């Protein structure tokens, strides 16, 4: 592989992980959201490199374009970008970080010990992940899941509307403060 | 790039997402970390789809994204509703199940 | 219910009435006793007992024709697998003899009680309790009849326990009176508990009989004895010795006699009926009935003889130094029971039964007459108290009496007859019955013979002492001076009993031996009684010598006043004191048995139960509580900690999957 390719990939990896860390460590929620958007964009580039153009664009559109915008709207609506300092739970941080480290080590060991294939990625045809191919598959083999997903989205929409409806009897019943 | 490169990214992103869920108190940031975890899984799916030359992985990613969108919608609606009552989205303040 | 068997003599089938009539008496008195007055209650109770007596007489007459007797089944009771135990009445010469004694003497005591209790309830201050007394008396007759008519050991045991219960109820009749307000109740408790120890022995014997013989029916058990004696002689020894324990409890022998003197706290008719004439003889009846078992175990017989002889001696010694009129008679009862038990052990069951019957007559007479004396003294107390306030003299203390033969002539005569009968002066009944026992002892065991002879001497001595102290000399207190004779209702039964005491010897006169022939249809006679002149003369002369000795000590120079010291105590000194204090047996029991037991009970209650068992149980509870308190900390309420625990679980599963390969 040419050197420039390696540098490119290393750069992408650094950006992806760096933005993830930035999201984790930042106190301001808006900054976290923006970091996440950048992360999604980097991932989309990686998808492109993996021969999945349709997925890459879907990622940009759905994740970075819809979900994160929704997040930003809600953060702006609630005005809670900075939480006041609360009391930490004893030993929680230590335990969480320790467990996470062990987790990483385990997964790495998993792949090594189980002789998971980690060979090079093959070359791909130009129409491997094209919309046409995905569409054919989607409407023949995976038709049922598509319909079900449509149903899920519909119910999510209705649910979101019902949950946030103000000044209506049903809404009041659902969101009555329970002490 | 060898597959292990994508594996590595995926593992690290997933772990960061898990840490975000465990360590942050802001409920919105927790939801965002969840999205991060989803994404790491998606990356893995696409990488293996590429490796084995089957499109099924990418289809899977498509569905995951759809469901993640639905879930975020509901989650945020819930948070808004909770905020109306509790006037805060600090997860630690929602501990009325304390026994 | 009542089986109509053609073979059965129809008179025999009347036997359930001896049980049912007193039951009817109880029910009538219970339900309508309030409305028929004292005379009515007394009449109902006496009629019930009289009816039992009448039926017993009929049964006796029927037995004269048909010596074998019969077994009258009444109710089906226990039927488990192949084991059948029914409520069957047994009519034979032995049980009819007991029935006659119990119901006959019982009837006379019922009539006496009408007059006695009329006075007593007013003296003690609760006239309403009159009815209760007669219900209990009938209940006693009921239980005693059950005891003597049972055809198997279990029915006998029911009656045995029943009379124990009635003894408790009647002893503690004035339960709120007595020393310190609980003296009578304590005496009743003592009687019941000591009896219980004996009952425990009897129960073990019944268990052993069932285990070894497989049946509890008298006929079947006694038929199997020779076979069992061959195969398991140890079992027979155990059975007879445990039964002996029961007998020592009920019939007041060593070591369980201690309740009888305290039982004098009950009203006098109770002492007469239960603790002289009938209940205490139940043990003797049991041993006579189980003759077959004792014949087969010479070891047990020896034990029985020695216990009887030693009891006779010990009780006689104690009686010499007692001052309460009823206590003297109580120890005398224990002594005479010792005679009977020794007779059974010597193999002279007929002599024992003969003495049982005559003893019932004259002991009941003595107790009832002492009741009459006490009544007279109480009259004298209340009469003398008009005017000057005197300290309350004990109406039962013999030192406060004296010269009563002038004021209470009828009582004096009957008391004298009873005392002479007890002392064994010919031709009164006591002479013949005691003589038979002495003859049997002389042929069986010379040492026992000497002991019994000495006990007979003591008997005559202390009865003479009592007569001289109570009836002769000058009245020592105002109570004695003002005593007056009791009513006819009291004195007529006394007179009847006096006649029986005189004539009772006719039951088994040497030569005719009526009782022996009568009982031979039920019992095995091993030593036919004979009349040995030398022994008869010896016992008669010893009794005369003892009475003369008593005259010299107490009659010639009577006590000057109530506070005078007993002349015997001067000569015997410390020994007299020891005899007065009952040889400290009660104190010994208290220290050796009761105190450690109380300590053990205290330990069990406080340490084992409260601290130990409750501690463990409560400890488990508090352990659970603290453990759940620990677990509670898991529910922090923070979603983050729950998520963390899920994550750690995932990590752990991965470790497992990793190492599983």
Image: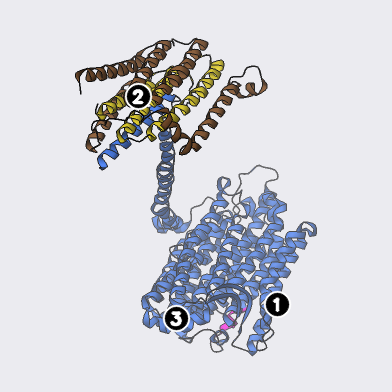
Chain colours: A brown, B yellow, C blue
Place of residue C276 in the rendered image (x, y in percent of width and height, measured from the top left): 57, 67
Looking at the rendered structure, whether the residues under marks 1 and 2 are on a common chain is answered as no
Mark 3 touches mark 2? (CB < 8 Å): no
- Read off the residue under disc 1: C54
Q: Which residues are magenta?
A: C503-510
Per the rendering, the mark at residue A47 is: 2
Residue C504: say if magenta.
Answer: yes
Res. B50 visible in picture: yes
Mark 3, secondary structure of its residue: loop
Please report, as a chain letter, where disc 1 is located.
Answer: C
Mark 1 touches mark 2? (CB < 8 Å): no
Mark 1, secondary structure of its residue: helix
Q: Which one is closest to the eye, mark 3 or mark 2?
A: 2
- Nearest the eye: C74 or C105: C74
The 10 Å Cα crowd at callout 3, few under 14, some 14 to 19, many 20 or more, is many
Q: Is residue C513 above or below residue C365?
A: below
The 10 Å Cα crowd at callout 1, few under 14, some 14 to 19, many 20 or more, is some
Per the rendering, the mark at residue C347 is: 3
C-alpha span from label 3 to label 2: 120 Å
- Nearest the eye: C105 or B82: B82
Q: Quadrant of the N terminus of chain C?
A: bottom right
Mark 2, secondary structure of its residue: helix
- Nearest the eye: C291 or C528: C291
Looking at the rendering, which quadrant does residue C417 occupy? bottom right
Residue at image position (43%, 52%) is C594
C-alpha span from label 1 to label 2: 123 Å
Place of residue A134 in the rendered image (x, y in percent of width and height, measured from the top left): 42, 31
């Amino acid at each position: 592989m040419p050197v420039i390719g390696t540098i490119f990939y290393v750069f992408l990896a650094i950006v992806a992980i760096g933005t993830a860390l930035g999201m984790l460590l930042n106190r301001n929620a808006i900054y976290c959201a923006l970091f996440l958007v950048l992360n999604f964009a980097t991932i989309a580039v990686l998808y492109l490199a993996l021969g999945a153009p349709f997925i890459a664009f879907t990622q940009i559109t759905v994740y970075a374009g819809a979900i994160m915008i929704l997040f930003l709207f809600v953060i702006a609506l609630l005005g809670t970008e900075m939480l006041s300092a609360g009391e930490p739970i004893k030993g929680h941080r230590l335990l969480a970080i320790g467990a996470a480290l062990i987790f990483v080590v385990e997964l790495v060991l998993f792949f090594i010990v189980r002789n998971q294939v980690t060979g090079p990625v093959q070359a791909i045809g130009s129409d491997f992940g094209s919309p046409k191919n995905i569409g054919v598959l989607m409407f023949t083999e995976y038709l049922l899941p598509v319909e079900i997903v449509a149903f899920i989205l519909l119910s999510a929409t209705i649910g979101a509307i019902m949950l946030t409806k103000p000044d209506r009897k049903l809404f009041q019943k659902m969101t009555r403060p329970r002490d | 790039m060898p597959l292990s490169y994508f594996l590595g990214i995926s593992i690290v992103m997933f772990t960061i997402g898990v840490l975000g869920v465990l360590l942050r108190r802001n409920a919105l940031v927790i939801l965002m970390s969840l999205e991060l975890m989803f994404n790491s899984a998606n990356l893995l799916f696409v990488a293996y789809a590429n490796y084995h030359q089957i499109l099924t992985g990418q289809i899977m990613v498509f569905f995951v994204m759809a469901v993640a969108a639905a879930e975020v919608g509901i989650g945020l609606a819930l948070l808004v509703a909770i905020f109306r009552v509790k006037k805060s989205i600090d997860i630690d303040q929602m501990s009325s199940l304390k026994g | 219910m009542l089986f109509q068997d053609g073979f059965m003599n129809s008179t025999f089938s009347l036997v359930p009435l001896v049980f049912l009539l007193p039951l009817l008496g109880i029910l009538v008195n219970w339900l309508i006793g309030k409305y028929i007055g004292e005379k009515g209650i007394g009449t109902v109770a006496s009629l019930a007992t009289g009816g039992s007596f009448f039926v017993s007489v009929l049964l006796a007459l029927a037995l004269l024709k048909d010596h074998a007797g019969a077994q009258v089944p009444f109710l089906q009771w226990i039927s488990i697998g192949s084991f059948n135990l029914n409520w069957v009445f047994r009519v034979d010469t032995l049980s009819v003899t007991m029935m006659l004694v119990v119901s006959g003497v019982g009837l006379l005591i019922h009539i006496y009680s009408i007059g006695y209790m009329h006075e007593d309830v007013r003296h003690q201050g609760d006239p309403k309790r009159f009815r209760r007394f007669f219900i209990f008396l009938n209940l006693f007759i009921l239980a005693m009849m059950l005891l003597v008519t049972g055809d198997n050991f279990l029915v006998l045991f029911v009656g045995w326990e029943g009379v124990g219960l009635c003894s408790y109820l009647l002893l503690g009749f004035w339960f709120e009176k007595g020393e310190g307000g609980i003296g009578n109740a304590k005496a009743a408790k003592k009687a019941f508990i000591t009896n219980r120890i004996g009952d425990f022995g009897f129960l073990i014997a019944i268990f052993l009989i069932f285990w070894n013989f497989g049946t509890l029916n008298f006929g079947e058990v006694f038929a199997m004895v020779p076979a069992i004696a061959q195969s398991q002689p140890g079992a027979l020894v155990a059975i007879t010795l445990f039964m002996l324990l029961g007998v020592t409890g009920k019939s007041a022998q060593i070591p369980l006699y201690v309740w009888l003197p305290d039982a004098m706290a009950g009203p006098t008719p109770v002492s007469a009926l239960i603790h002289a004439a009938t209940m205490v003889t139940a043990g003797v009846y049991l041993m006579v009935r189980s003759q077959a078992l004792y014949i087969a175990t010479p070891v047990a017989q020896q034990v029985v003889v020695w216990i009887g002889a030693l009891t006779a001696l010990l009780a006689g010694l104690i009686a010499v130094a007692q001052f309460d009129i009823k206590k003297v008679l109580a120890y005398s009862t224990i002594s005479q029971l010792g005679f009977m038990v020794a007779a059974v052990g010597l193999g002279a069951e007929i002599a024992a039964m003969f003495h049982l019957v005559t003893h019932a007559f004259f002991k009941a007479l003595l107790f009832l007459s002492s009741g009459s004396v006490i009544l007279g003294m109480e009259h004298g107390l209340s009469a003398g108290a008009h005017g000057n306030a005197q300290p309350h003299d004990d109406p039962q203390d013999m030192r406060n009496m004296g010269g009563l033969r002038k004021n209470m002539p009828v009582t004096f005569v009957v008391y004298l007859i009873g005392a002479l009968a007890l002392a064994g002066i010919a031709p009164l009944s006591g002479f013949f019955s005691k003589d038979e026992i002495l003859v049997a002892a002389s042929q069986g065991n010379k040492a026992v013979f000497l002991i019994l002879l000495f006990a007979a001497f003591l008997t005559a001595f202390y009865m003479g002492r009592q007569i001289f102290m109570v009836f002769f000399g000058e009245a020592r207190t105002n109570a004695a001076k003002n005593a007056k004779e009791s009513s006819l209702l009291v004195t007529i039964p006394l007179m009847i009993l006096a006649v029986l005491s005189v004539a009772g010897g006719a039951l088994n006169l040497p030569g005719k031996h009526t009782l022996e022939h009568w009982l031979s249809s039920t019992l095995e006679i091993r030593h036919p009684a004979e009349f040995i002149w030398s022994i008869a003369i010896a016992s008669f002369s010893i009794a005369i010598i003892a009475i003369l000795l008593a005259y010299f000590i107490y009659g010639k120079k009577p006590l000057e006043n109530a506070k005078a010291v007993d002349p015997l105590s001067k000569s015997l000194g410390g020994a007299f004191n020891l005899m007065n204090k009952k040889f400290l047996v009660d104190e010994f029991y208290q220290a050796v048995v009761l105190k450690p037991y109380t300590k053990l009970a205290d330990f069990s209650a406080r340490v084992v139960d409260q601290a130990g068992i409750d501690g463990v149980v409560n400890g488990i509870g508090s352990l659970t509580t603290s453990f759940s308190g620990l677990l509670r900390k898991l529910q922090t309420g923070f979603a983050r900690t729950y998520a963390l625990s899920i994550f750690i679980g995932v990590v752990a599963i991965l470790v497992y999957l990793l190492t599983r390969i």
